[in-house]
Image: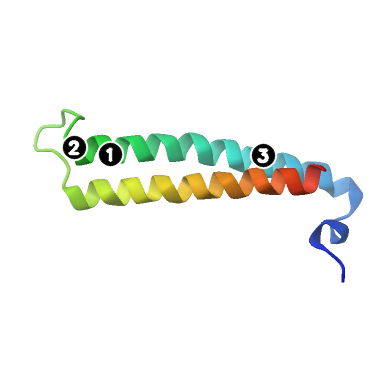
């Protein structure tokens, strides 16, 4: 059986690897920001007059966790195609 790594031509492995690491870094950065912003909004630490509802802050927190998962998959893709 042919693996995915063997299906990708050798000249394209480097760009795919770089794209994977870029997705990982962006996902990690934005996921970290969303996760901490969601937690801060949930505990009313942002200082926004009127505040943000707890449901909205949990949606932001969940999006941050999801983006951290995307970052993990980006790093896994980088390790898969680069080695």
Frontmost of labels 2 and 3 is 2
* Mark 1 surroundings within 10 Å by alpha-carbon count, few (fewer than 14), some (14 through 19), many (20 or more): some
What residue is drawn where x is 16% and y is 35%? 44
* Mark 3 surroundings within 10 Å by alpha-carbon count, few (fewer than 14), some (14 through 19), many (20 or more): many
- Asked whether the residues under the numbered discs 2 and 1 touch, taking CB atoms below 8 Å apart as contact, a structural biologist would say yes
Frontmost of labels 3 and 1 is 1
Query: Residue 30: where, in percent of width, then height?
Result: 46, 37
Which label sits on residue 43?
Answer: 2
As drawn, 5 above or below 18: below
Query: Residue 82: where, in percent of width, then height?
Result: 80, 42
- Disc tally is 3
Q: Quadrant of residue 42?
A: top left
- Which of 48/36 is in front? 36
Q: How is the image coloured?
A: rainbow
Secondary structure at numbered mark 3:
helix
What residue is drawn where x is 87% and y is 59%? 6
- Which of 45/47 is in front? 45
Secondary structure at numbered mark 1:
helix
Q: Is residue 16 found left or right of 43 in the rendered image?
A: right
Q: Which residue is mark 1?
A: 39
- What is the C-alpha distance between the residues marked 2 and 3? 33 Å
Report the quarter where the N terminus lies: bottom right
Q: Which residue is mark 3?
A: 21
Secondary structure at numbered mark 2:
loop
What residue is drawn where x is 45% and y is 40%? 31
Q: Is residue 2 found left or right of 66 in the rendered image?
A: right
Q: Is residue 28 found left or right of 75 in the rendered image?
A: left
């Amino acid at each position: 059986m042919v693996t995915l790594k063997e299906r990708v031509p050798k000249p394209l492995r480097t760009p795919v690897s770089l794209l994977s690491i870029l997705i990982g870094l962006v996902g990690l950065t934005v996921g970290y920001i969303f996760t901490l912003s969601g937690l801060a909004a949930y505990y009313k630490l942002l200082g926004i007059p009127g505040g943000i509802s707890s449901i909205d802050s949990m949606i932001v927190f969940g999006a941050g966790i999801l983006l951290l998962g995307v970052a993990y998959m980006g790093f896994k893709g980088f390790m898969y195609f680069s080695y």
